[in-house]
Amino acid sequence: MINLITKTQKEYTLVDSGDGEKLEKFGNFLIIRPETQALWQKGKPELWQKANAIFKKEWAISRDTPNEISLEVSGVKTKIQIGKGRNVGIFPEYISLLELFREIIETKKGIKILNLFAHTGLSSIIYAKAGGEVVHVDSSRSSNEIAKNLADENGVGDKIRFITEDALDFMKRDVRREQKYDFIVLDPPSFGRGEKGQVFKIEEKITELVGVAKKLLKENSIGILLSGYSSGFASMSYSNVLSVSTGKDVVSGALSIEEEGGRLALPLAKWAFACGTSDVKDIISKLNK
């Protein structure tokens, strides 16, 4: 198990957590959101009263807090949106994972990356800035519009191809077109509904997703990365899916965020990676030492 922990960023901090909630700082704004993993007591209860926005069943936002907040994380200009739903547009627990694979991509030249369930584009932008040629696929038209604008703002709009389509449908068509990729990223939700009303349940689709992804991998590839927030599945479950479906060596672990001051790390997601070439295995293996 390799547990990756995101540290405090230039404009993002996990200030505190506990009692089923987390207190985060995005830019200059403190935001409270529910978090079922935070089973312990809060460490800095006095700071929670200073929050600019709170989400419970709906948002309560102070008058001087904008609905859109620009910030920089891991060298990428991005933004969050509050006022619509619990998710704000980025998932800070993924930053350590993205930085790991940025390092791997930087050792390659002109690699083709298929980024599925790519959301608002933070991962696509990081991979493109590292030198990858990225195909960004998400079924949400609004998420892709945000991703396109952010890619242009970060100077990599010409390195990313944006596709608004069901991920599995796109992959199957790419198989028929005999497309191949060096690196495939899957970050499916536990449950989703497409713009045409199609329902996605991870337990029904994950084996097929990985199986089709394997068909799209080049022979000497980086590998397949599978990650997710789904609370009902352990990282070992993701690892087993990749191992059985690809026959490759697999590593896996949790994705967490360290509280400011280092009191603890809040576990939020999990990841598993089916390793490709030996040099990639070497980079990953160093994390265990």
Image: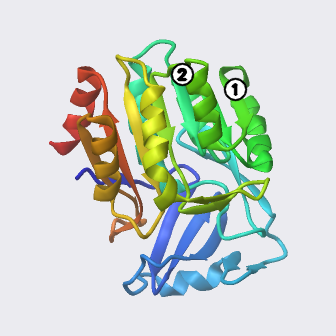
Evaluate whether residue 125 shows in this view.
Answer: no
> In this view, which residue lies farthest toward the top?
109
Give the residue at x 51% y 48%. Answer: 187
Q: SS for tag 2?
A: loop
* First of labels 2, 1 by sequence position: 2
- Label 1: few (<14), some or many (≥20) within 10 Å? some
Q: Is residue 159 above or below residue 67?
A: above
Tell which of 50 and 22 is nearer to you.
Answer: 22
Disc 2 marks which amino acid? Answer: Gly
Q: Is residue 36 above or below residue 285?
A: below
Tell which of 111 and 288 is nearer to you.
Answer: 111
- Say if mark 2 contacts mark 1, CB within 8 Å: no
Horizontal side of residue 214 vs 275, given as left or right: right
The quadrant in which residue 137 appears is: top right
Disc 1 marks which amino acid? Answer: Arg
Residue 161 is tagged as 1
Horizontal side of residue 168 vs 143, given as left or right: left
Q: SS for tag 1?
A: strand
Give the residue at x 51% y 53%. Answer: 205
Expressed as whole percent of the image width and height from the top left, the position of residue 72 reads: 62, 45
Cα–Cα span, label 2 and label 1: 11 Å
Q: Is residue 174 above or below residue 170?
A: above
Residue 132 is tagged as 2
Tell which of 271 and 12 is nearer to you.
Answer: 271
> In this view, which residue lies farthest toward the right?
63
Tell which of 257 and 231 is nearer to you.
Answer: 231
Q: Is residue 263 above or below residue 112?
A: below
